[in-house]
Amino acid sequence: MNNISAKPQTKSRSMTRLPFDVPLVLIIAALLVIGLLMVYSSSWDASLIMEKPPTYIFTRQVLWVALGIAVAVGLSYFDYHKFEPFVAWLMLGVIAMLTAVVIRNRFQGISSRSLLNSSVQPAEFAKLGIVLYLSFWLSKRKDLLHDKDTVFIPLVFILGLVAGLIVIQPDLSAAITVGALVIMLFFLSGADLKQTLILFLLVAIVGGGVIAISSTGQARINDYLRGFQDPINSSYHVQRTYEAIIKGGFFGVGIGQADTKFTGLPLPHTDSIFAVIAEETGLVGSFVVIILYVLLIWRGVTIAKRAPDQAGSLLAFGLISWIVIEALMNFAVIVGLMPFTGNALPLISAGGSSMLTTMAAIGITMNVARQGTAKEIAERSQTSAVVNLRGRDRWRSVSGTNRYGDS
C-alpha cells in the first residue's frame, strides 16, 4: 500500500512545479521595481538638462525594462545548448563593436564607450559574450585544462584582446569585471589552483601596469588614496555620495525628498543611484537592496548546482556572478571602499544596453533552471517507477532475475 500511494504523490509534486524559478523571478522583480522607482525619483533634473520633459529618462527606462522582460521570457524558453554553434560568431561581433569604438574615438579625438549616438555600449555585450563563449569553450575542453597550449594560452589571448579593447575606451570597471569572470570560469571548469593563481597574477600585473600608465587610472587611484587618508580630500563625486549617505541616516528622508541629486551629485540616475537610495531610504533601504543581490548570488549558485551539465553550471554561475560583481563594485565606490569605476548598478540604474544584456543573462539562467528542474523530475519519475514496479512484482520471478543482473 505504501508503494502504491507513492506514485500519485510524485505526480502531484511534478504537476505543481512551476515552469520558472520562483525565487529568482521574485528577486529580479523586486530589483526592477526599486530601479524604476529610484530612476523616476532621480532623473528629473537630468531630463530637463537634456531639454526634454521631466519624465523623459523614466519613460525610456520603462520601455527598456519592458523590452528586457520580453527578452528574458523569450530566452527562458530557448534551449541554452542552441547557443553553442553561434558563440564564436557572437564573440567576433563583440570584438568588432569594441574595435569600432576604439577607431571612432581615435579619429574623432573623443573618449566614449558607446556607438550609435550612445544607444549601444559594446562593453556590456562583451560581459555577456565572454560568459557565453567561455562556458561552452571550457566545458568542451575540461579534459585538456592542464595543457597550456590548448587552453591556457588561448584563454589568456582571448582575455587580453577583449579586456585590452575595453581599457582603451577607457572603461576600467568593465575590464575588471571581464577579468574576474574569466578567472572564475577557468577555476570552476576544473583548472587546478596553481593554474588559477598564475592567471590571476598575470591579470593583476598587466592590469596594474595599464592603470599605472593610464591618466584616467592614475587620477582615480590618486583621488582614492587622498580620500582614504582623509575623506575631506576625496574627489567631488565621492564627497557628494558621502553627503547623500549621511543625510539619509537610518530611515532616509523619504522617497523623492532627497536634495543631493538636484544640487550637484554626478549621474544620480546611473552610476550614483545607490547614493540616492541611501539618502531617500536610509541604511534600512540600502541593506534591503544589498540583501537582494546576496539572494541573487545564492540563487545563481543553487541553479548552477542543479544544471544538467557543466556548460549550464558555468553559464548560470558566470551570468549571475557578473551581475553581482557589478553591483558590489558600485556599492564599494559609493561608500569609498574602492576607486571610482563608473559602472551602473545592474537592474536599477537607467540605461538600455545594461538593462537588455542583464535581462538576457537572467533569461538564459532561467532556462538553465528549467532544464535542471526537468532533469530532476525525470530522475524522480524513473526512481518512482522502479520502486512501484518492485512493489507490485515483489514475489515474481522478475525480482529474482534482476537481482542477478540477467536480462
Image: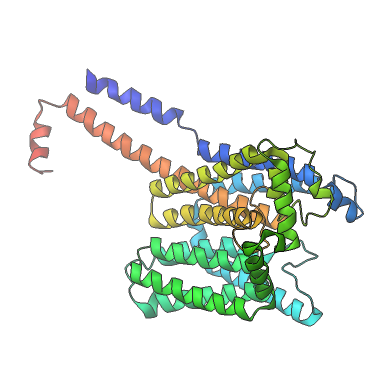
Q: Where is residue 234, by image quadrant?
A: bottom right
> Relative to 381, is 277 above or below?
below
Q: Residue at x 34, y 28 (%)?
A: 10
- Judge left or right: residue 183 versus residue 274: left
Q: Quadrant of the N terminus?
A: top left
Residue 150 location, x and y as percent?
38, 77
Residue 249 location, x and y as percent?
68, 40
Q: Where is residue 165, by image quadrant?
A: bottom right
Asked if residue 214 can be seen in this view, the reply is: yes
> Relative to 346, is 24 above or below?
above
Q: Quadrant of the C terminus?
A: top left
Q: Residue at x 80, y 38 (%)?
A: 257
**Considering depth in this image, is 376 or 184 the residue closer to the camera?**
184
Asked if residue 85 can be seen in this view, the reply is: no
- Judge left or right: residue 96 versus residue 374: right
Residue 148 location, x and y as percent?
37, 78
